[in-house]
Amino acid sequence: MIIVLKPQIAPEEITKFTEHLKADYEVKVNRWDGVHSTVLGLIGDTTKVDIEYIDAQEIVESVKRVQEPYKKANRKFHPENTVIKISDNVSIGDGSLHIMAGPCSVESEEQIVGVAKSVQASGATLLRGGAFKPRTSPYAFQGLKAEGLDLLKAARKETGLPIVTEIMRVSHIDMFENVDIIQVGARNMQNFELLKELGKIDKPILLKRGLSATIEEWLMSAEYIMAGGNEKVMLCERGIRTFETYTRNTLDISAVPIIKNLSHLPIIVDPSHASGKSRLVEPLAMAAVAAGADGLIIEVHNDPPHAWSDGAQSLTPKQFDKVAKRVFALKNSL
């Protein structure tokens, strides 16, 4: 249930009203103070709440029930966009466009530092790179693991770029203490025990959409993290599995405006994993920006033909520079 209060209500009146709701109806009340109004979100069994009585209160402007099972991620509860500050220079969700760029897998210090410097020069504001790699085949390269995390930190020290990398299991959380954004991959979108633990830490989470997940299932996974207390969640559309086999996945561009309508959380688009083909990254990135995405996550490798993983979808630094110029130009024209 959502209660919108009238403007310019005294804080003590709001507090008194909130405590009354908690005591009388045994619900949890979340409060969001916007520029023009205050919104109260009631979570719990609201079937016994008397809407007519609530609506008759002097400080109440409107009240309505919410049917969607996700509450904290719901725009109805939080009308204003969430803005997540990553560093002094990077805030995601504030209307600007940010690109997370780097290799699928961290391979060496020379490689990750070199790529970091090149993507930064082209306008990327975050460095992505895989230290732990979930692979379909048990015989494929699984990442440098802890060493890969250390190399990402070395690249951050050289460039100042915040780092984004994927976590695989609950037991690894302590290792990610100095990671700027923890990525939850598509295969772990419904690893609820991991999501619960990530809800207990104060760190931005990039939650990728599962291979066959509906938008509601995706938002419910975000809800797991937010219900634990961590509301620094970004969603990432990376393509879903369909009957089409020409591309690695099918990028659901419609998810961008849908998420913007349903949720206040920032949304990032991954054109690299969506297509699996480097030549498709630019047009898909342009489409994502035009649709309203808050950012892109793009794979860039110094030598794609010899990449240890996902070389076919990786751009060279020169190709990335061209793509970055075009997407920023498009963003500035909107």
Image: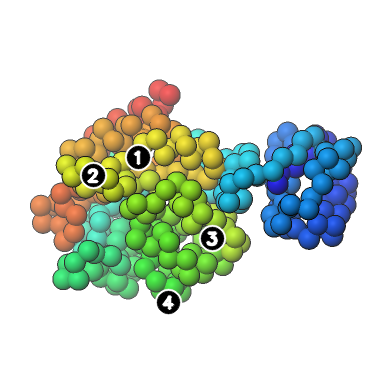
Mark 1 near mark 4, Cβ–Cβ under 8 Å? Answer: no
- CA distance for labels 1 and 4: 32 Å
Q: Is residue 317 visible?
A: no
Q: Which of the two marks, 1 or 2, is nearer to us in this view? A: 2
Q: From the viewer's perspective, tell me whether residue 185 is left or right of residue 57.
A: left
Q: Position of residue 138 (x, y in %)?
A: 20, 71
Residue annotated with mark 2: 243
**Quadrant assignment, res 322:** top left
Residue 6 position, x and y percent, is: 81, 35
The image position of residue 164, as x and y in percent, is 38, 57
Q: Is residue 239 above or below residue 139?
A: above
The kind of residue on which mark 3 rests is Tyr
Amino acid type for the residue under numbered disc 1? Asp
Q: In the drawing, what numbered circle is on residue 252?
A: 1
Q: Is residue 205 above or below residue 253?
A: below
- Outermost residue to the bottom: 171
CB under 8 Å between callouts 4 and 2? no
Category of crowding for the residue at label 4, using alpha-carbon neighbours closer than 10 angstroms: few (below 14), some (14–19), many (at least 20): few
Considering the numbered disc 2 on the image, is that residue within a helix, a strand or a loop? loop
* Of labels 1 and 4, the one closer to you: 1
Q: Which part of the image, by quadrant, shows the C terminus?
A: top left
At x 28%, y 48%, the residue is 241
Give the residue drawn at x 79%, y 39%: 5
What amino acid is labelled 2 in the image?
Answer: Phe
Verify CB contact (< 8 Å) between mark 3 and mark 1. no
Q: CA distance from mark 4 to mark 2?
A: 36 Å
What is the secondary structure assignment of the residue under circle 1?
loop
Q: Which residue is mark 3?
A: 224
Which numbered disc, 4 or 2, marks the residue closer to the eye? Answer: 2
The three-letter code of the residue at mark 4 reads Ser
- Which is closer to the viewer, label 3 or label 2? 2
Read off the residue under disc 4: 171
